[in-house]
Image (cartoon, grey):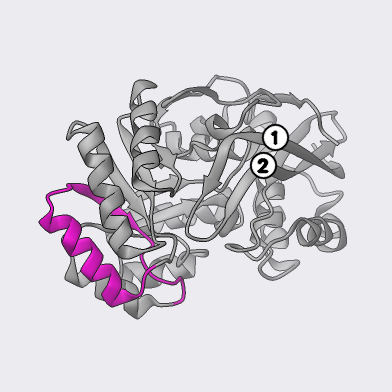
């Protein structure tokens, strides 16, 4: 099964409602789609969202990295030589993790097809069904409380609340939400780098004192501020998760060695795909640090790849793969099955994706 061609397309999918964080507001998913075509007629699908404010990768940069560097490096290679392909993919261009992730995902799709097995079974086969949280965008406290109640009505037991815009208002937001949903619902918060270290400690201690019972806080400080991240981790009781601070396996091991955070959030668009994500999982097992699997605003191709990883590995104990359910429609034929909070995998080879409607 040799790589014959790599084709690039684009999908546009409106969101059900605007997605708001401390960093940005988004109204639709605008993702690059990769199709790797082989000499046997097999097709592997990959996907990458242009998330410049987090990864630095714009749509043009993703396409250029694939066309000018990645494509030239791996065309003609045999999927059987998987490790060699991955070495070339990693070394052909520095950074550009979203472009690498899109191609990596398509390659793993083909790897599963080559051996006629669903990817999660090849990677570990720990489970077939997972439960995700759902994100509540940052708004005024009353609106966030209403959005949280709506999510509970759809069966969600864990909410990820976007904060980080204003610390005093964030406390009011969390009090309003906890009052609205009660204490049978898990609340985790994501500051998206929105606080300074001392501000984070002040805010989180206020939440602790108010008895809000926060499950974890994700990336409270700027991504580069590892000392600040450790300061927060050492000074609050709420478990701290590193997200934007971890792109590579090297980033992850540094966090683990310093104990700068309590948990790691793995996102394929940061790691450059499944190959490096698997390395982080192995490191996490050694250091005894549980992981979350998360996503950017992505449609079902790349999120299906993340679902396969989550299903394969027991060290991934927390799931934040709500991207597809935030979309107003699903253009992907096949892949993981999303039933609100419940995500199931089907036993089709690779990712199990048959095609994509509206691909431009």
Q: How far across and down, in percent of the image, does residue 176 sit?
A: 26, 43
Q: How far across and down, in percent of the image, does residue 185 sit?
A: 24, 33
When asked about the image quadrant of residue 168, the answer is bottom left
Q: How far across and down, in percent of the image, does residue 198 sit?
A: 27, 76
Q: Which residue is mark 2?
A: 29
Q: Which residue is mark 1?
A: 13
The magenta segment is 195-224
> Mark 2 vs mark 1: which is more N-terminal?
1
Q: Is residue 125 above or below residue 284?
A: above
Tell me if 269 is positioned left or right of 151 in this view.
Answer: right
Front position in the image: 117 or 337: 337
Query: Which residue is at a point 88% across and 35% down the rendered structure image?
Result: 39
Q: Is residue 260 above or below residue 160?
A: below
Question: Does residue 130 show up?
Answer: yes
Front position in the image: 243 or 163: 163
Helix, strand or loop at mark 2 = strand
When asked about the image quadrant of residue 347, the answer is top right
- CB-based contact (under 8 Å), mark 2 and mark 1: yes
Query: Which residue is at a point 48% across and 38% down the rendered structure image?
Result: 321
Q: Residues within 10 Å of mark 1 (few under 14, many from 20)?
A: many
Q: Is residue 200 magenta?
A: yes
Query: Which residue is at a point 46% across and 76% down the rendered structure image?
Result: 224
Front position in the image: 359 or 17: 17
| Cα separation between marks 2 and 1 | 5 Å
Q: How far across and down, in percent of the image, does residue 252 sit?
A: 42, 65
Q: Which mark is residue 173?
A: none
Tell me if 20 is positioned left or right of 132 in this view.
Answer: right
Q: Residues within 10 Å of mark 2 (few under 14, many from 20)?
A: many
Helix, strand or loop at mark 1 = strand
């Amino acid at each position: 099964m040799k790589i014959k061609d790599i084709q690039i397309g684009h999908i546009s999918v409106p969101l059900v409602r605007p997605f708001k964080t401390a960093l940005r507001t988004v109204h639709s998913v605008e993702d690059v789609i990769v199709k790797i075509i082989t000499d046997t007629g097999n097709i592997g699908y990959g996907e990458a969202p242009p998330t410049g404010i987090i990864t630095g990768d714009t749509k043009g940069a993703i396409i250029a990295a694939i066309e000018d560097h990645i494509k030239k490096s791996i065309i003609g290679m045999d999927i059987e030589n998987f490790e060699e392909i991955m070495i070339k993919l990693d070394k052909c261009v520095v950074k550009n993790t979203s472009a690498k992730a899109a191609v990596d995902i398509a390659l793993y799709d083909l790897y599963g097809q080559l051996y006629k097995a669903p990817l999660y079974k090849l990677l570990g086969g720990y489970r077939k069904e997972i439960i995700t949280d759902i994100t509540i965008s940052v708004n005024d406290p009353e609106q966030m409380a209403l959005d949280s109640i709506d999510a509970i009505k759809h069966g969600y037991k864990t909410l990820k609340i976007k904060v980080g815009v204003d610390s005093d208002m964030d406390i009011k937001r969390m009090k309003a939400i906890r009052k609205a949903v009660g204490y049978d619902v898990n609340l985790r918060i994501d500051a998206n780098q929105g606080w300074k270290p001392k501000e984070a400690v002040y805010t989180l201690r206020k939440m602790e004192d108010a008895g809000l019972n926060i499950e974890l806080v994700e990336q409270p400080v700027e991504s580069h501020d590892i000392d600040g991240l450790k300061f927060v981790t050492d000074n609050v009781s709420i478990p701290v998760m590193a997200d934007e601070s971890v792109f590579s396996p090297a980033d992850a091991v540094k966090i683990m060695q310093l104990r700068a955070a309590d948990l790691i959030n793995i996102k394929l668009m940061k790691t450059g795909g499944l190959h490096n994500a698997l390395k982080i999982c192995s490191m996490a097992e050694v250091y005894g640090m549980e992981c979350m699997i998360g996503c950017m605003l992505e449609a079902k191709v790349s999120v299906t790849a993340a679902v396969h990883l989550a299903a394969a590995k027991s060290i991934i104990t927390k799931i934040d793969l709500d991207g597809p359910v935030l979309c107003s429609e699903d253009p992907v034929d096949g892949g993981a099955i999303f039933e609100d909070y419940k995500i199931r995998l089907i036993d089709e080879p690779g990712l199990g994706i048959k095609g994509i409607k509206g691909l431009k």
